[in-house]
Amino acid sequence: MAIRAEHLNYLYGAGTVYEQYALKDVSFQIQDGEFIGLIGHTGSGKSTLIQHLNGLLRAESGALYYNNENIYQDGYDMRGLRSKVGLVFQYPEHQLFEVDVFSDVCFGPKNQGLSKAEVEQRAREALIQVGLDERFWQQSPFELSGGQKRRVAIAGVLAMQPEVLILDEPTAGLDPKGRDEILDEISALHKEKRLTIILVSHSMEDVARYADRLLVMNRGEKLFDGPPKEVFSHYRELEAIGLAAPQITYIVQDLRRHGVPIAEDITTVEEARDEILRLLG
């Protein structure tokens, strides 16, 4: 089991009149190799939660286990944890700073104390994994497009060879083509490397298409935890907390109200296409 959280609580402004829960009694388990979609409105606790998963924040109470070890126990190797649980922040290109792309991707593994040859091999492999053409490797990262910068930032985390990859809105600000390319690369990594992926997203379409399971946060609490089809069946409850289901879900519901015997649990355009073709014979 990759991650197990037990009754996590985290307060902002603890002991002041502004005290409020950012996380409240949050428990869940994530198995090795799962692709998790983490959703919730702004302020729901998503970003706070993911910063607990690699020890950047520490819960006020509760326990957090990585590979069955409590990361809050005395003497736990937090630096080792952060090399195994890689976190790509929103707009990660703001963290790029080296003179060229290749040097930037080398930075993480270099700090792991690896040999120069191993560092460079990992950087090459990571850049290939994210699909960045070799002609860009010696360029300044600041000369690249937004989507290319995003790939470099993700490669920098992959070069440390994490077992869990957490991505906070990795497609924010990208055009549709760039968004699809990034998500397809992440999906390919999940399938080829059996990486455990945690994708924070505001796009219901994206998590419906890529995630095996969804965690829904609301006001610091876990509201739903289950497969996308099950979670999106609660679309009225999701609307009440400022979320929604994928747009295709509403189209399907309209068709059913008009007597079309289409399956009720469709959450992606591809599923709708296949179901309509089936109905047409």
Image (cartoon, grey):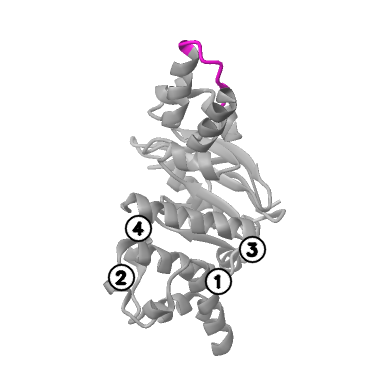
Q: Residues within 10 Å of mark 2 (few under 14, many from 20)?
A: some
Name the amino acid, label 3: Tyr
Which secondary structure, mark 1? Answer: loop
Q: Which residue is mark 1?
A: 160
Q: Residues within 10 Å of mark 4 (few under 14, many from 20)?
A: some
Q: Which residue is mark 3?
A: 76
Q: Which residue is mark 4?
A: 91
Q: Which residues are magenta?
A: 257-265
Contact, mark 2 vs mark 4 (Cβ under 8 Å): no
Name the amino acid, label 2: Leu
Name the N-terminal-most of marks 1 and 4. 4
Tell me the distance, in whole angstroms, between the alpha carbons under discs 3 and 4. Answer: 30 Å
Q: Tell me residue 231's x, y (percent).
A: 55, 29
Q: Does the rendering let one see residue 231? A: no
Label annotation for residue 4 = none
Name the N-terminal-most of marks 3 and 4. 3
Which secondary structure, mark 3? Answer: loop
Q: Does the rendering let one see residue 176? A: yes
Name the N-terminal-most of marks 2 and 3. 3
Q: Tell me residue 58's x, y (percent).
A: 52, 52
Q: Residue at x 68, y 53 (%)?
A: 32
Comparing marks 2 and 4, which lies closer to the viewer?
2
In the image, 142 versus 274, the foreground residue is: 274
Contact, mark 2 vs mark 3 (Cβ under 8 Å): no
Q: Residues within 10 Å of mark 3 (few under 14, many from 20)?
A: few
Q: Which residue is mark 2?
A: 144
Name the N-terminal-most of marks 1 and 2. 2
